[in-house]
Amino acid sequence: MVSFTTLVTAVAAAVSTVTASPLEALKRGIQPGTGYHDGYFYSYWTDGRGWVDFNNGPRGSYSVSWSNVNNWVGGKGWNPGPPRRIAYNGTWNNYNQNSYLALYGWTTNPLVEYYIVEAFGTWNPSTGASRLGTIEDDGGIYDIYRTRRVNQPSIIGTATFDQYWSVRRQKRVGGNIDTGKHFNEWRRQGNLQLGQWNYMVMATEGYQSSGSANIEVRSLD
Protein backbone atom coordinates (compact mmCIF):
# COMPACT_ATOMS: atom_id res chain seq x y z
CA MET A 1 0.00 0.00 0.00
CA VAL A 2 1.39 3.40 -0.98
CA SER A 3 0.66 6.31 1.36
CA PHE A 4 1.31 9.97 0.64
CA THR A 5 0.45 11.38 4.09
CA THR A 6 4.00 12.22 5.10
CA LEU A 7 4.93 13.28 1.57
CA VAL A 8 2.40 16.08 1.37
CA THR A 9 3.87 17.97 4.31
CA ALA A 10 7.47 17.48 3.24
CA VAL A 11 6.85 18.18 -0.42
CA ALA A 12 4.87 21.36 0.22
CA ALA A 13 8.03 22.98 1.55
CA ALA A 14 10.08 21.68 -1.39
CA VAL A 15 7.58 22.91 -3.95
CA SER A 16 7.54 26.36 -2.39
CA THR A 17 11.26 26.73 -3.13
CA VAL A 18 10.89 26.34 -6.91
CA THR A 19 9.40 28.72 -9.44
CA ALA A 20 7.54 25.96 -11.32
CA SER A 21 3.86 25.31 -10.72
CA PRO A 22 3.13 22.38 -8.37
CA LEU A 23 2.24 20.15 -11.31
CA GLU A 24 5.40 21.12 -13.17
CA ALA A 25 7.34 20.30 -10.02
CA LEU A 26 5.61 16.93 -9.93
CA LYS A 27 6.68 16.22 -13.52
CA ARG A 28 10.28 17.06 -12.61
CA GLY A 29 10.23 14.40 -9.90
CA ILE A 30 9.96 16.68 -6.86
CA GLN A 31 6.58 15.24 -5.92
CA PRO A 32 6.05 11.51 -6.61
CA GLY A 33 2.48 11.63 -7.84
CA THR A 34 2.14 9.04 -10.65
CA GLY A 35 3.01 5.41 -11.10
CA TYR A 36 1.67 1.87 -11.27
CA HIS A 37 0.21 -0.23 -8.48
CA ASP A 38 -1.22 -3.76 -8.68
CA GLY A 39 -1.69 -3.52 -12.44
CA TYR A 40 -3.28 -0.05 -12.50
CA PHE A 41 -1.95 3.43 -13.18
CA TYR A 42 -2.45 5.99 -10.43
CA SER A 43 -2.20 9.76 -10.48
CA TYR A 44 -2.07 12.01 -7.44
CA TRP A 45 -1.61 15.79 -7.32
CA THR A 46 -1.96 18.44 -4.65
CA ASP A 47 -0.99 22.09 -4.59
CA GLY A 48 0.53 21.46 -1.17
CA ARG A 49 -2.05 23.25 0.96
CA GLY A 50 -3.88 21.35 3.67
CA TRP A 51 -3.60 17.64 4.40
CA VAL A 52 -4.23 14.65 2.12
CA ASP A 53 -3.85 10.92 2.87
CA PHE A 54 -4.07 8.97 -0.42
CA ASN A 55 -3.59 5.19 -0.32
CA ASN A 56 -3.54 2.71 -3.19
CA GLY A 57 -5.42 -0.50 -2.43
CA PRO A 58 -5.75 -3.85 -4.25
CA ARG A 59 -6.41 -3.84 -8.00
CA GLY A 60 -8.11 -0.57 -9.04
CA SER A 61 -9.01 0.61 -5.55
CA TYR A 62 -7.87 3.53 -3.46
CA SER A 63 -8.89 5.33 -0.28
CA VAL A 64 -8.39 8.98 0.53
CA SER A 65 -9.08 11.50 3.27
CA TRP A 66 -8.37 15.21 3.04
CA SER A 67 -8.71 18.24 5.28
CA ASN A 68 -8.66 21.98 4.62
CA VAL A 69 -7.13 21.62 1.16
CA ASN A 70 -7.04 24.23 -1.54
CA ASN A 71 -6.98 21.76 -4.45
CA TRP A 72 -6.08 18.10 -4.88
CA VAL A 73 -7.05 15.32 -7.33
CA GLY A 74 -6.18 11.64 -7.51
CA GLY A 75 -7.37 8.24 -8.67
CA LYS A 76 -6.60 4.95 -10.38
CA GLY A 77 -7.07 3.78 -13.95
CA TRP A 78 -4.99 3.40 -17.09
CA ASN A 79 -2.18 5.05 -19.04
CA PRO A 80 -2.67 5.41 -21.90
CA GLY A 81 -6.43 5.68 -21.54
CA PRO A 82 -8.16 4.98 -24.87
CA PRO A 83 -11.96 4.60 -25.03
CA ARG A 84 -13.22 1.76 -22.86
CA ARG A 85 -16.23 0.68 -20.84
CA ILE A 86 -15.56 0.85 -17.12
CA ALA A 87 -17.36 -0.04 -13.90
CA TYR A 88 -16.78 1.56 -10.53
CA ASN A 89 -18.17 1.36 -6.99
CA GLY A 90 -17.40 2.59 -3.51
CA THR A 91 -18.24 5.41 -1.13
CA TRP A 92 -17.98 9.16 -1.58
CA ASN A 93 -19.56 11.31 1.12
CA ASN A 94 -19.00 14.86 -0.05
CA TYR A 95 -22.37 16.22 -1.13
CA ASN A 96 -21.99 19.08 1.34
CA GLN A 97 -18.39 19.82 0.35
CA ASN A 98 -16.74 21.18 -2.79
CA SER A 99 -15.69 17.93 -4.42
CA TYR A 100 -16.11 15.82 -7.58
CA LEU A 101 -16.28 12.12 -8.32
CA ALA A 102 -15.42 11.77 -12.00
CA LEU A 103 -13.81 9.73 -14.73
CA TYR A 104 -10.92 12.10 -15.40
CA GLY A 105 -8.21 12.24 -18.03
CA TRP A 106 -6.03 14.09 -20.53
CA THR A 107 -5.09 14.05 -24.19
CA THR A 108 -2.28 15.85 -26.00
CA ASN A 109 -2.21 17.42 -29.49
CA PRO A 110 -4.62 18.96 -28.73
CA LEU A 111 -4.07 19.31 -25.00
CA VAL A 112 -7.44 18.59 -23.35
CA GLU A 113 -8.47 17.93 -19.76
CA TYR A 114 -11.75 16.03 -19.53
CA TYR A 115 -14.28 14.99 -16.89
CA ILE A 116 -17.23 12.60 -16.89
CA VAL A 117 -18.73 13.77 -13.61
CA GLU A 118 -20.76 11.22 -11.67
CA ALA A 119 -21.32 13.28 -8.52
CA PHE A 120 -20.43 16.73 -7.24
CA GLY A 121 -20.88 18.65 -4.02
CA THR A 122 -21.65 22.29 -3.43
CA TRP A 123 -20.22 23.55 -6.74
CA ASN A 124 -21.66 22.45 -10.08
CA PRO A 125 -18.78 22.40 -12.59
CA SER A 126 -21.10 23.51 -15.38
CA THR A 127 -21.86 26.83 -13.67
CA GLY A 128 -21.40 29.65 -16.18
CA ALA A 129 -20.82 27.31 -19.15
CA SER A 130 -23.11 26.89 -22.16
CA ARG A 131 -24.64 23.44 -22.61
CA LEU A 132 -23.65 21.91 -25.96
CA GLY A 133 -25.83 18.80 -25.88
CA THR A 134 -26.72 15.70 -23.88
CA ILE A 135 -25.65 12.05 -23.63
CA GLU A 136 -27.57 9.07 -22.27
CA ASP A 137 -25.35 6.46 -20.65
CA ASP A 138 -26.15 3.66 -18.19
CA GLY A 139 -29.67 4.93 -17.56
CA GLY A 140 -28.72 8.55 -16.89
CA ILE A 141 -28.58 11.85 -18.75
CA TYR A 142 -25.35 13.85 -18.90
CA ASP A 143 -25.04 17.46 -20.07
CA ILE A 144 -22.07 18.38 -22.29
CA TYR A 145 -19.99 21.51 -21.67
CA ARG A 146 -16.68 23.06 -22.69
CA THR A 147 -14.65 25.51 -20.62
CA ARG A 148 -11.18 27.00 -21.12
CA ARG A 149 -8.23 27.27 -18.75
CA VAL A 150 -5.68 30.02 -19.44
CA ASN A 151 -2.06 29.68 -18.25
CA GLN A 152 -2.89 26.93 -15.75
CA PRO A 153 -1.04 23.76 -14.63
CA SER A 154 -1.31 20.83 -17.03
CA ILE A 155 0.45 17.55 -17.75
CA ILE A 156 2.92 19.45 -19.96
CA GLY A 157 3.42 22.39 -17.60
CA THR A 158 1.68 25.76 -17.53
CA ALA A 159 -0.53 26.02 -20.61
CA THR A 160 -3.85 27.16 -22.06
CA PHE A 161 -6.22 24.31 -22.85
CA ASP A 162 -9.88 23.32 -23.12
CA GLN A 163 -11.80 21.27 -20.58
CA TYR A 164 -14.56 18.95 -21.82
CA TRP A 165 -17.34 17.91 -19.45
CA SER A 166 -20.15 15.40 -19.22
CA VAL A 167 -22.07 16.14 -16.01
CA ARG A 168 -24.60 13.56 -14.83
CA ARG A 169 -27.92 15.10 -13.79
CA GLN A 170 -28.74 12.42 -11.22
CA LYS A 171 -25.72 12.03 -8.95
CA ARG A 172 -24.54 8.53 -8.12
CA VAL A 173 -21.62 6.60 -6.62
CA GLY A 174 -21.34 3.36 -8.58
CA GLY A 175 -22.21 2.17 -12.06
CA ASN A 176 -20.87 1.76 -15.58
CA ILE A 177 -19.47 4.41 -17.96
CA ASP A 178 -18.98 3.93 -21.70
CA THR A 179 -16.23 6.49 -22.26
CA GLY A 180 -16.24 5.97 -26.03
CA LYS A 181 -19.89 7.03 -26.17
CA HIS A 182 -19.04 10.29 -24.41
CA PHE A 183 -16.02 10.96 -26.62
CA ASN A 184 -18.06 10.34 -29.79
CA GLU A 185 -20.92 12.57 -28.67
CA TRP A 186 -18.51 15.35 -27.69
CA ARG A 187 -17.21 15.34 -31.26
CA ARG A 188 -20.61 14.98 -32.88
CA GLN A 189 -22.60 17.51 -30.83
CA GLY A 190 -19.98 20.04 -29.82
CA ASN A 191 -17.12 19.55 -32.29
CA LEU A 192 -14.94 18.79 -29.27
CA GLN A 193 -11.79 17.18 -30.62
CA LEU A 194 -9.59 14.90 -28.55
CA GLY A 195 -5.94 14.13 -29.19
CA GLN A 196 -3.43 11.44 -28.26
CA TRP A 197 -4.56 9.47 -25.25
CA ASN A 198 -2.77 10.13 -21.99
CA TYR A 199 -4.01 8.81 -18.65
CA MET A 200 -7.59 8.07 -17.57
CA VAL A 201 -8.47 7.56 -13.89
CA MET A 202 -11.59 7.26 -11.75
CA ALA A 203 -10.80 10.30 -9.67
CA THR A 204 -11.81 12.16 -6.57
CA GLU A 205 -11.11 15.89 -6.49
CA GLY A 206 -11.42 18.30 -3.59
CA TYR A 207 -11.32 22.08 -3.75
CA GLN A 208 -11.25 24.24 -0.61
CA SER A 209 -12.84 21.39 1.33
CA SER A 210 -12.47 18.34 3.56
CA GLY A 211 -13.76 14.85 2.86
CA SER A 212 -13.11 11.17 2.22
CA ALA A 213 -13.72 8.47 -0.39
CA ASN A 214 -13.12 4.78 -1.07
CA ILE A 215 -13.35 3.92 -4.78
CA GLU A 216 -12.61 0.90 -6.98
CA VAL A 217 -12.57 0.90 -10.81
CA ARG A 218 -12.23 -1.90 -13.36
CA SER A 219 -12.42 -2.29 -17.12
CA LEU A 220 -15.35 -4.13 -18.73
CA ASP A 221 -13.51 -4.57 -22.06
Image (tube, rainbow, N blue to C red):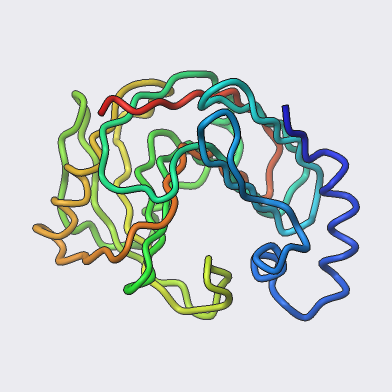
Identity of the residue furthest to the front in this view: 39
129 w.r.t. 167: above or below: below
Dividing the picture into quarters, in which one does residue 188 lie?
A: bottom left
Left or right: residue 48 compared with residue 84 = right
Depth check, front residue: 80 or 179? 80
Residue visible at 77% across and 34% down?
A: 3
Q: Quadrant of residue 192?
A: bottom left
Is 111 drawn above or below residue 39 in the view shown?
below
Q: Nearer the viewer, residue 198 or 45?
A: 198
Q: Position of residue 162 (x, y in %)?
A: 36, 69
Location of residue 190 (image quadrant) = bottom left
Quarter of the figure that contains the N terminus: top right
x and y, in percent, of residue 218 in the image: 40, 25
> Residue 154 at what x, y percent from top left?
53, 68
Is residue 207 visible in the rendered image? The answer is no
In the image, is 215 to the left or to the right of 199?
right
Residue farthest toward the left in the current orientation of the protein: 188
Give the residue drawn at x 55%, y 25%.
61
